[in-house]
Amino acid sequence: MRLKTFSGGIHPSEFKDLTEHKSIETAPLPERVIIPLQQHIGAPAECTVQKGDQVTTGQPLSEAGQFVSVPVHASVSGQVESVQHMPHPQGISTLSVIISCDKDSSELVSREKPDMDLHSLEPDVVLDIIKSAGIAGMGGASFPTHVKLSPPSDKKIDTLLINGAECEPFLTADHRLMLEKADEIIKGIQVLMKVLKVKQTFIGIEKNKSDAIQLLQKKTKKFKKISIIGLPVKYPQGGEKQLIQAVLNRQVPSGGLPMDVGCVVQNVGTAYAVYEAVFFDKPLIERVVTVTGPGVAEPKNVLARIGTPFKDLIEFCGGYKTDAAKLLNGGPMMGITQVTDEVPVIKGTSGILVLDKKTAKIPAESPCISCARCVDICPMKLMPNRISSFVEHDRIEDARKYGLLDCIECGSCSYICPAKRYLVHYIKFGKKRHNELRASS
Amino acid sequence: MNRFISASPHLRDNTSIPRIMYIVILTLLPAAAWSVYIFGLRALWIILVSIVTAIATEWICQKCMKRPVTVADGSAILTGLLLSFNLPPAVPIWLPAAGSFVSILIGKQIFGGLGYNPMNPALIGRAFLMASWPVHMTVFKTVPKGMNSLSGIDSITGATPLAVFKQMREILINRADYLPEQVTQATETMYQLNRSYWNLFFGKTGGCIGEVSAFLIFAGACFLLYRRIIGWKIPAAYIGTVIVLTTVFGGTDGLLTGNALFHIFSGGLFLGAFYMATDMVTSPVTFAGRLWFGVGCGVLTVIIRLWGGYPEGVSYSILLMNLTTPLLDRYTRPKVFGG
C-alpha cells in the first residue's frame, strides 16, 4: 500500500478521539423538519407542495427542471406547515418547506429490490435514479452527483477516486460509515464505476483511520479494480485537487475540474447514498452527522433526517456544556458559524461542532512579519500574504494575477499565521469583489 | 449560549509573534553568557544598555506617533541584543545606547514598526556606528579570559583573526613589495591562523561580543531550525557560497588554495547567516528567493573580506541584500498549482 501526498498542508490537532470509536446512533425524529429547497450548487428546483398538503417520507417536494439541479424530498411524513423563508446553515435565508412530523408514519420502510442485478443496469437509467433521489455531494460542496457523473463526451474519464480522507479535525462521520457500511459503500462504488465506465477506482483514506483502511482492504481484495490508498494525516488532504495530486500524481489545471485530468471524485457518503437509491429506491432523506466539540456534553455520530434542526441533535447529545460559545456547520477549518441553532441539517452537513470559549476566542491581528509560513504551507502554492494584502488595498487585478481565484479557501494560511492575520477572509472577500467587478464591467 | 460569530477557520495554531521572538532570544543567551565569561562584566553592561535603550526608544516612538505600544512582543529586545552582539567589548558605554536608538528609530519605527522595515534594524544601527565612530568600532583590545591573544594564535596579540588574515594576505599576495623576513613571518602566521579552528569555533579569540563562539551560535540555530522558526535555505545558501568562494579565491597560493573553514568560523559569519540574514521581515518569502538571497549575501561578504576595505563583510552584505528582497520576491513567485 503506497503513501503519497500533496505539497504544503498543516497538521492541526485532530480531536477525533471524541467520537471515532462511537457507532452511529439513529437520532429520534424531530417535532418538525425544515427542508430548504436549495441544498445544492446549481439552479433552484421548483416547489411542488403547498401549505396544508399531506406528504409521506420520501415524497419529492420539488421538481428539478434544469440539468444542474436536484429535487428535495420529505424526510418525514406529516403535514406541510408552511413554505417560507427560513435560516439556512450556509448563512442565507432560503425558501424552505416546514413539515410537522407524524412520528407513527415516518418510519422508513425497506423497499429493497432483491432481484436488482448490477450488471443489467444501464448508465442512463442509473443517472436518472440518482437525480430523482436528489443526491448531491455529501462531502460538503453539494454538487449534483448526476452532473458530476455525466462529463462531456470530449473528457475521457479513466479513474474514479473515492474520498475517504475526512481531513477536517473533529469529524468522524465518514470514518464510521466506512467501518459500519463497508459492503454497501463498495456496491455503491461499483454502480459509480459502471456509470462512468472506468477501469479503476482508488479509495483514499488518511492513516488515522487505519481500522477503516484494513477493513476496506479486506473487503476489496476480490475486486481487482478497487484499491485502497493510505494517505498521510495532513490538512487539506481531502481537498479534491490535493487528493488527485496525492493518489494519481495529476494536477488539475488552474480553473479546471478533475475531469480535465481524466478522473471523477466522490465522497464515501455519496457512494453510500447512490447505493441506497439504486438498490432500495430510497431518496436522500437522511445522513450521518458528527455532533461534537468541547461544548457538547456527549459527542456522537448520529444518523439524522435531513431537515432536523441542529437544536434537536444537540439535545440528543446531552445538550450544551456551560462554556459552549460557538456553533458551526461543518468542521473547524471551513465550517460556517451559525447565529441560531434552529437551522436544519442539509445534504452537505457532515458535522455540527460546538466550540468552547477558549477555542472560540478570536485573537488580535498584528502586522505581517513576512515569516512566509503561509507561502510554505499553501496547498495551491499561492502567496496568501500578498494576495490578501492586495485585496486590503483594493488591488483586485493584482490579486487575480497572484492566483486569487485558485484559492480553495481551506483556511490553512490563517491557521498557521503567527500574526493572526485574516488571510483567507480577505481572499474570500476578494473573490466576491472580483466577481462584482466582472459583472459590472 | 454565548455566541461568537466569525468566519472560518475557527482553529488557530498556537504560534505567535512574541513566542517566536522570545525563543530566538533564548537561543542567543548561551552565546551571550559565554561572551560575559570571556570578556567580563563589561560585555554584560553593553548588552543590557543596548536592550534597555531599544525598549525605551520603541516605547517613546510609539507613544509619540500615537500607535499601540508593542514592546512586549520581544522584537525590540531582540534588536537590542543582536546589536550588542555586533560590538567590540571595549566600546564606551554610551555607544550601544546611540546605536540602539538609531536601530529602533531609523531602522524600524519611522517605517511603521514591526513588519514594515526594509532593512535589518540591528545592522542599520551597526552601520551607523561604523560610519560615526570607526575607531571605537574597530579597536579590539579586550583579550579573552584565559587566553593569551585576540587572534587565537600566540604570536599575534593585537588583532582579531580576520584582521590578521587581511594583513597577512596583503603581504602574501604582494610579496614583491615586502622584505623576505616579512613574507616568511606572514607565511608562518597564515599557517597558524589556518589551524586555529578549535579556537575560532568555540570562541577563544577576540572579536565582537556575540560573534566569537560559532559553536554556541550554531547550537542555538540548530534549535531554531528544529522548531522551524528559521529555515535552512538562507543559512545553507549563505554559508555554502562562502565556502565555495573562499576555497576558490581565498588562498594566497593561487586558485583553490583557500581555507573555507577559517572563513566560516570567523567574523560573525554564523551569527550573520543564522540570525541576521534570516530576519523574516527583511528576507524573501519564496523558496528560490531565499536561496538567491543567501547566495548574494555570500558573494558580497567574500568580496568585501578578500578585496574590500574592511576585514569583515557580513553586516554590509546583508544590508545590501535586504534591499533586493522585494525584487527577489517578485521574480521568484512559485508556480500556482495547476498553472
Image (cartoon, coloured by chain):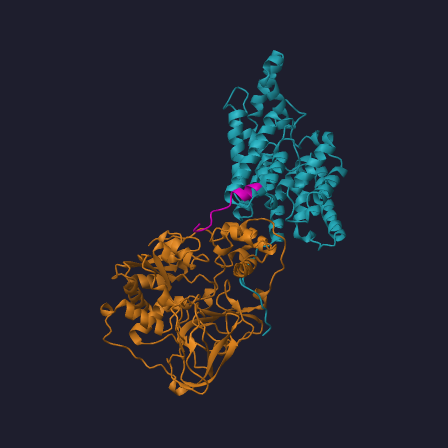
Chain colours: A orange, B cyan
If the image is split into quadrants, where does the C terminus of chain A sit?
A: bottom right
Q: Is residue A246 left or right of residue A390?
A: left
Q: Could you say which is closer to the camera, residue A173 or residue B28? A: A173
User: Residue A347, position in %: x, y?
Assistant: 43, 71
Q: Residue at x 72, y 37 (%)?
A: B42
User: Residue B229, position in %: x, y?
Assistant: 56, 48
Quick check: is B331 in the magenta stretch? yes
Name the main secondary structure of what is drawn in magenta.
Answer: loop
If the image is split into quadrants, where does the N terminus of chain A sit?
A: bottom left
Q: Is residue A44 left or right of residue A146?
A: right
Q: Could you say which is closer to the camera, residue B320 or residue B230? A: B320
Find the magenta span and give its range: B327-339
User: Residue B22, position in %: x, y?
Assistant: 63, 50
Q: Count of labels shown?
A: 0
The answer to whether one can see residue B198 in this image is no
Above or below, A319 against A330 in this view is below
Q: Could you say which is closer to the camera, residue A255 or residue B21? A: A255
Q: Residue at x 43, y 59 (%)?
A: A239
Q: Is residue B95 left or right of residue B26?
A: right
The answer to whether one can see residue B152 in this image is yes
Q: Could you say which is closer to the camera, residue A181 or residue A386? A: A386
Quick check: is B198 in the magenta stretch? no
User: Residue B169, position in %: x, y?
Assistant: 59, 21
Q: Quadrant of residue A206?
A: bottom left
Above or below, B12 against A287 in this view is above
Residue at far front of view: A441
